[in-house]
Amino acid sequence: MHGWQDNSGSFDRLIPLLPRNHSYLAIDLPGHGLSSRIPHGMQYHSVDNLYTINSLCKAYSWDKISIIGHSLGSILAFLQASIFPSKVDIVVAIDALKPPVFDPVIAASIIEERVEDFILADQRNQMKSEPPAYPLDEIVEKWCAATRGSVTKETAHYLMRRNIKKSDMHPGKWSFLRDSRLKYSFGANFPQEVSVELARRINMPYLFIKAKNSPYYEKKSYHEEVATVLKENPKFEYHMVDSTHHLHLTEPEKVAGIISDFITKHKNNPDKLS
């Protein structure tokens, strides 16, 4: 079982609770954690991560993969499974069903702001200036605030293992490792009609877990329309869990059983790794 998501450390508490007769590989996507950054002057786009997945498959001679993804990783799982259905044998997606649709009224202003902020972030990278540094307790506070409490103080350190580094200029302080250009990247903001058609292509076992106390990041009706299409697949399961966005990190016991049962049900040959 191979899992891709935007922060490999966020799976540290979940993976030990999953079936042990499979192997699990969690990676940092480009620009995240300890992974390399893209060259100066280039922009991150979530669709580009399809090249990452398929390049890894080619490098390791994997004909098919199984994917566990959360948030950005969950959207990436949806794209990989729908665009390359013959290359995916099972999907577990957590709290992001599909690429969100931009509000057309504010789309231009969002793009304008992100382009301008990206240029500034790219310039800082080229100057090799050290990012802002903070004491560890302030790093934790920032993580909790940025996720609106979805990441807790008790679990933030799992993310910190691969996402912060000691400051060279400020003893006792730490900086975030990720490429700041990621904050101004663009997702796969397809029209709703595209996501609906992509959903029709998904035919493998597909588990989706929605956190009850997490937003939909778009009109709920868009989410529900794609979920309805996915339910036409007899191997699709939809579970609602009473938790927040980072439930696999903060409350892994609430999802581990659901995921383990799904893996056991659909992985016919547990001794064969995909």
Image (cartoon, helix red, strand yellow):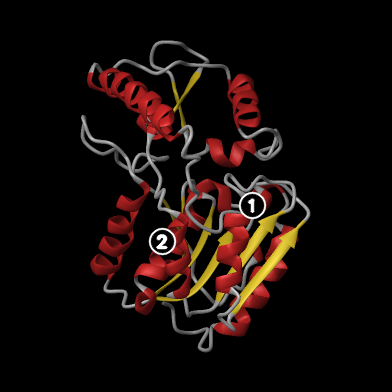
The reply to whether the C-beta atoms of the residues labelled 2 and 1 are less than 8 Å apart is no
Q: Is residue 157 left or right of residue 195?
A: right
- Tally of numbered tags: 2
Up-down: is 216 above or below 74? above
Question: Which residue is rendered at x = 21% and y = 30% of the image?
Answer: 40
Do we see residue 77 in this rendering?
no
Give coordinates of residue 179: x percent, y percent.
36, 32
Q: Amino acid at mark 2?
A: Val
Residue positioned most to the top: 170
Q: Secondary structure at mark 2?
A: helix
Residue 194's label in the rendered image is 2
Along the line of sight, the residue nearer the viewer: 204 or 199: 199
Q: Position of residue 188 (x, y in %)?
A: 39, 50
From the viewer's perspective, is 198 left or right of 257? left
Q: Residue furthest bottom?
A: 268
Q: Relative to 219, say whether 115 is above or below.
A: above
**Helix, strand or loop status at disc 1:** helix
Residue at 61% x, 65% y: name it. Answer: 208
Please tell me which of labels 2 and 1 falls first in the chain: 2
Q: Position of residue 210 (x, y in %)?
A: 67, 57
Q: Is residue 158 visible?
A: yes
Query: Percent from the top left, x then y, of residue 12?
Result: 58, 52
Crowdedness of circle 2 by 10 Å Cα count: few (<14), some, many (20+)?
few
Circle 1 is placed at which residue position?
220
Three-letter amino acid code of the residue under disc 1: Lys
Q: Residue at x 38, y 28 (%)?
A: 114
Q: What is the distance, in whole Å, between disc 2 and disc 1 at their CAs?
A: 17 Å
